[in-house]
Image (cartoon, rainbow, N blue to C red):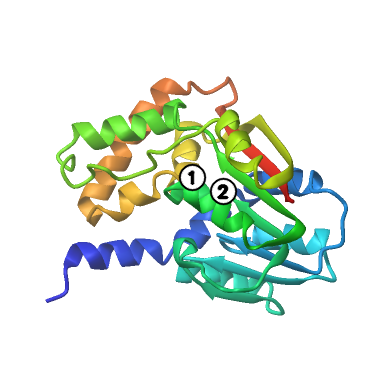
């Protein structure tokens, strides 16, 4: 018999690309800032790990229009959206942790993805190993686990009737700039790490903040719940967000969003 909870999660996942692109301009700005810091060397081959709906791949294509570019994502819905967006490029459904192809690349991009993948102590060296010598790794990851948006989702998850179901859900690993610099320096001739906080004005107050998070941080929590639980979770979370992020006089919330950036060049 089909599990109705699994069916609900599948229905929810079918719309993740549409939810993600509701704030596409805000989500794409960091990847443009990241790629602007890549050293100006020839890029013949490039790959976008965790390409999502293709907005980051589009920025990669703008940087290296003559390169052979492809994208990977674990979500079939995201890959379908990316293929529609950039039909001349190759996109594949794949798990980054199982990415074992022998090819090497001049540029490996990963925008807002690797924060979901565990074991960075082995993952990052493995990815660097797929760079050509002198090739570049460009990574951007949200660095917001300590922000009220993420603290509150963990608190709501732990305090509700769904607590057992949501135990261990969401991101848990978080490392600072020193960690990545130390990890990558033995493998790379140059490592540049920096942190930027973006302030996104979101019209619509707490509802807009929740809509933003439904496309990213809330996804694993909501996907684990059935429809009724999901609605109740969102109501509780929305009320908590409204208290933590009071709207300005015009109803806008200025949402702080810190992100960590890494550009490293393989020896």
The reply, left or right, for residue 66 in relation to residue 80 is right
Q: For the point 32% across and 47% down, which residue is it?
A: 221
Please tell me the numbered disc located at residue 112. 2
* Residue shown at the point (27%, 49%) measured from the top left: 230
Secondary structure beneath dot 2 equals loop
- Picture quarter with the N terminus: bottom left
| Residue located 69% across and 73% down the image | 86
Q: Nearer the viewer, mark 2 or mark 1?
A: 1
Q: Is the residue marked by circle 2 packed among few (<14), some (14-19), or many (20+) residues within 10 Å?
A: many
Disc on res. 186: none
Vertically, is 135 above or below 214?
A: below
Residue bearing mark 1: 121
Q: Residue 135: tell me if it is visible.
A: yes
Instruction: Using the numbered discs, state the Cα–Cα distance from disc 2 to disc 1 in whole angstroms.
Output: 18 Å
Q: Is residue 257 visible?
A: no
Q: Nearer the viewer, residue 73 or 129?
A: 129
């Amino acid at each position: 018999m089909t599990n109705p909870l699994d069916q609900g999660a599948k229905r929810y996942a079918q719309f993740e690309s549409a939810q993600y692109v509701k704030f596409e301009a805000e989500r794409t700005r960091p990847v443009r800032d990241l790629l602007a810091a890549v050293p100006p060397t020839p890029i013949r081959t490039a790959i976008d790990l965790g390409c999502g709906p293709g907005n980051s791949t589009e920025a990669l294509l703008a940087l290296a229009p003559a390169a052979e570019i492809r994208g990977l994502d674990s979500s079939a819905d995201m890959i379908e959206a990316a293929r529609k967006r950039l039909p001349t490029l190759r996109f594949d459904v794949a798990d980054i942790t199982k990415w074992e192809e022998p090819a090497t690349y001049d540029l490996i991009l990963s925008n807002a993805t690797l924060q979901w993948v565990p074991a960075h102590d082995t993952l990052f060296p493995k990815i660097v190993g797929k760079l050509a010598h002198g090739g570049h790794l460009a990574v951007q990851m949200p660095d917001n686990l300590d922000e009220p948006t993420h603290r509150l989702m963990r608190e709501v998850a732990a305090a509700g009737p769904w607590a057992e179901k949501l135990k261990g859900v969401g991101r848990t690993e978080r490392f600072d700039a020193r960690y990545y610099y130390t990890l990558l320096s033995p493998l790379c001739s140059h490592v540049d790490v920096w942190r930027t906080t973006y302030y996104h004005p979101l019209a619509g107050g707490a509802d807009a903040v929740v809509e933003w998070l439904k496309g990213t941080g809330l996804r694993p929590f909501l996907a684990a719940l059935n429809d009724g639980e999901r609605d109740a979770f969102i109501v509780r979370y929305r009320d908590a967000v409204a208290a933590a992020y009071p709207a300005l006089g015009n109803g806008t919330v200025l949402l702080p969003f810190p992100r960590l950036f890494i550009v490293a060049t393989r020896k």
